[in-house]
Image (cartoon, rainbow, N blue to C red):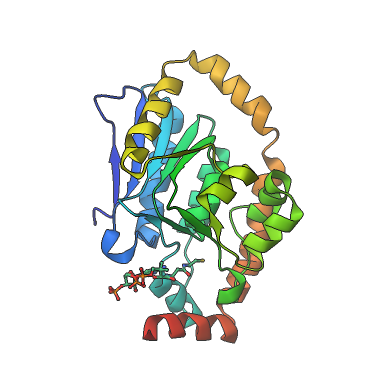
Amino acid sequence: MTNHVLVERPDAHPGVQVIRLNRPEKKNAITREMYAKMTTALTVAQSDLAIRVTAFLGTEGCFSAGNDMADFLAVALGGSMGREVLDFLRALAGATKPIVSGVDGLAIGIGTTIHLHCDLTVASARSLFRTPFVDLALVPEAASSLIAPRLIGHQRAFALLAAGEPLEAADALAAGLIWKIVDEESVEEETLSIAAGLARKPPEALRIARDLIRGDRKDVLTRIDEEAEHFAAQLKSAEARAAFEAFMRR
Ligand code: COA
């Protein structure tokens, strides 16, 4: 087991569970093991009364460079995809307690789409959201093809998810993808203090409010599965393999 994902319960912020991406030497690229650890943390949060809010954080200057490219290449070369990514996406979309996130710097692929499942996201001004799915011969995931057009409109969703255009923090704020821009040195503290504030609220009222605001999750879970089928097929394509090999060769 690595410590590429740290799961913490900070004493200073009761009721908050932190899931921290902690692989800065690889820009917090997420491996199958990391997905599995995050899924376990989200599952624990569902039943543990002491956890009222989960907060996702990255490291200084980088939230995540997305799925690990070596893992993608392994699948393209004939390996199994495993269940880790899908299990994580289902746990994320099915979570019934609030999730917040703090971004400082790069947020690529799942590093962007994860926030579509968060209730409040703060980001530093230097943050950059980008999903180069199609450039990698892949397709959108995490139900982003459903949630993003609803949230930010078709054109911006298309620019982000299909054209691979980056969104700077100010544009992400204007689009409604994030809640607030904060100083880069206070991303973590702001995120935790927002999480702690939510953790102090009456949990049942907060749960109901969140449910009402988010609406029925069935269509989201169905879209996650639909996207995953296309994603799995594309991962095995010659064009995707060429893109992963090109990245690994750089
Ligand atoms: N998977 C695996 N390793 C990754 C990675 C990823 N998604 N993103 C970055 N890394 C690794 C690099 O290979 C490099 O490792 P090395 O030092 O052993 O060579 C290290 O992280 C630093 O990355 P580097 O590319 O040198 O940093 P950079 O600042 O020049 O560029 C990125 C950063 C994120 C823009 C660039 O690494 C990138 O485009 N990564 C791929 C992002 C992506 O397409 N993700 C999948 C989305 S679906």
- Would you say 232 lies left or right of 199 here? right
* Quadrant position of the C terminus in the picture: bottom left
Quarter, ligand 1: bottom left
Q: Residue at x 34, y 54 (%)?
A: 61
Q: Residue at x 56, y 22 (%)?
A: 207
* Quadrant position of the N terminus in the picture: bottom left
Q: Is residue 96 visible?
A: yes
Kindly indicate the quadrant of the structure image that contains residue 27: bottom left
Out of 247 and 188, give the one closest to the viewer: 188
- Would you say 88 lies left or right of 193 here? right
Q: Residue at x 57, y 43 (%)?
A: 173
Percent across and percent down for residue 214 are 65, 33
Percent across and percent down for residue 134 are 62, 72
Q: Residue at x 39, y 81 (%)?
A: 248
- Would you say 248 lies left or right of 178 here? left
Q: Is residue 222 visible?
A: no
Percent across and percent down for residue 183 are 37, 40
Percent across and percent down for residue 40 are 39, 43
Q: Residue furthest top?
A: 202
Q: Residue furthest right?
A: 154
Numbered label tally: 0
Out of 162 and 212, give the one closest to the viewer: 162
Residue 101 against residue 72 in the figure, above or below: above
Residue 189 against residue 111 in the figure, above or below: above
